[in-house]
Image (cartoon, rainbow, N blue to C red):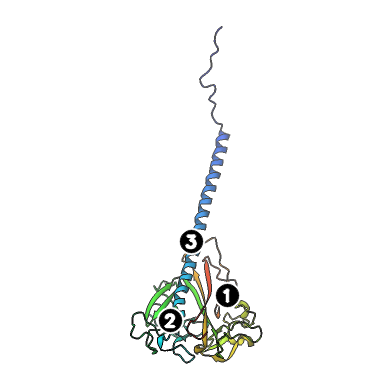
Amino acid sequence: MTPRRYSPHASNNGFTLIELLVAMIVTAIVGIAMVSNSISQQRSSTMVRQVAQLQQQLRGAVYLMEEDIRIAGYMGETGAATVTSPFGVTDVRSYSITDENTTPTMTGAPLGSPSMTLAYDWDPNNAATTGNGILDEPTVSYRLFDDNNDNLIDLTRDTNGQRQLMAEGLQAIGFAYAIDVDGDGQLDRTAGNNNIIWAVDSNNDNTLDTNLDTNDDGVIDINDDANANFVIESADGGAGIINPPATLLQIRMVRIWMVARTRTADPQYTNIEQYVVGAHVVPAQAGGFQDNFRRQIIDHSVQFRYLGL
């Protein structure tokens, strides 16, 4: 019997053109999915990192400010601070936001940016004057400033003209003050709903004439801006008027707001938020910033340790 011969190529049939096309399409789909997922993860990682940086900046700035705030009013061993003490908060007026070549000038709302200046009888570099009861130590001012002329606003700590950078990329800052006008050792509250009065200087005369909680609901929000002019004023209602105005010597606690912005935009994100920052609503236009920058806000209250409570 003659053995059957097999062709060596009989079992090596190749892929058809259709099979190759299907394989190429599947490979392309998987590749596109992997690249898209990688880009999405990278975007998400960048967003998380930027938000974390904003939060870190804001918390760090508040921590450093808190150190100054807690020591304001200190009078050393010569006696405790009283309502006649020259130490504590000395300036709550608004100033223009300048660059490093310009001196800030007093500018009222809505053009000015709130600031806070503190005085205390303590200087770690000069033991001879610390605690002597005389206002001869450097004052400390917190205000917004364009530190590098880069159109990005920064928070600085100004000590007799020497600026120290505290935080970069701030959009806005605000301060409000809890007061004890009658000197009973308790924070003053509204007669209606017993809410803490958070006072500001609305006309730049360095006295506190407006309670930000104009509707007396215990929350400072956009509903307090009854005139829709994006600046909360004493004219917004009876609950907002402090008459007579409180003096800076009657301040017992400060509330700090700060809004920070990322340096780079995220094309996949649109910011439609409005933020209440002290006596200002930021931004002025309804619908928010309408840009691609992420922002974070911090709202923190600090009691003055040496100012009466």
Q: Which residue is mark 3?
A: 49
Element type at mark 2 = strand
Q: Which mark is residue 186?
A: none
Q: Secondary structure at mark 1?
A: loop
Tell me the CA gap for discs 2 and 3.
30 Å
Few, some or many residues within 10 Å of mark 2 (<14, 14–19, 20+): many
- Assess disc 1: are there few (<14), some (14-19) or many (≥20) residues with their C-alpha within 10 Å of its C-alpha: few
- The disc labelled 2 sits on which kind of residue? Ser
The answer to whether the residue labelled 1 contacts the one labelled 3, judged by CB atoms less than 8 Å apart, is no
Confirm whether residue 237 shows in the render. Answer: no
Residue at screen point 49% across, 67% down? 55
Q: Is residue 291 above or below residue 243?
A: above
Residue 160, quarter of the rendered image? bottom left
Identified at 53% across, 51% down, the residue is: 37
How many tags in the picture?
3
Q: Going from the N terminus, do you reach mark 2 or mark 3 first?
A: 3
Q: Quadrant of residue 26?
A: top right
Q: Quadrant of the N terminus?
A: top right
Question: In 3D space, how far apart are the residues under numbered discs 2 and 1 (Cα atoms)?
Answer: 30 Å
Q: Position of residue 50 (x, y in %)?
A: 48, 63
In the figure, 296 relative to 208: above or below?
Answer: above
Q: Say which label, 1 or 3, has the lower sequence index.
A: 3
- The residue under label 1 is 285
In terms of depth relative to the viewer, which is nearer, 90 or 288?
90
Q: Secondary structure at mark 3?
A: helix
Q: Residues within 10 Å of mark 3 (few under 14, many from 20)?
A: few
Residue on which the image places disc 2: 141
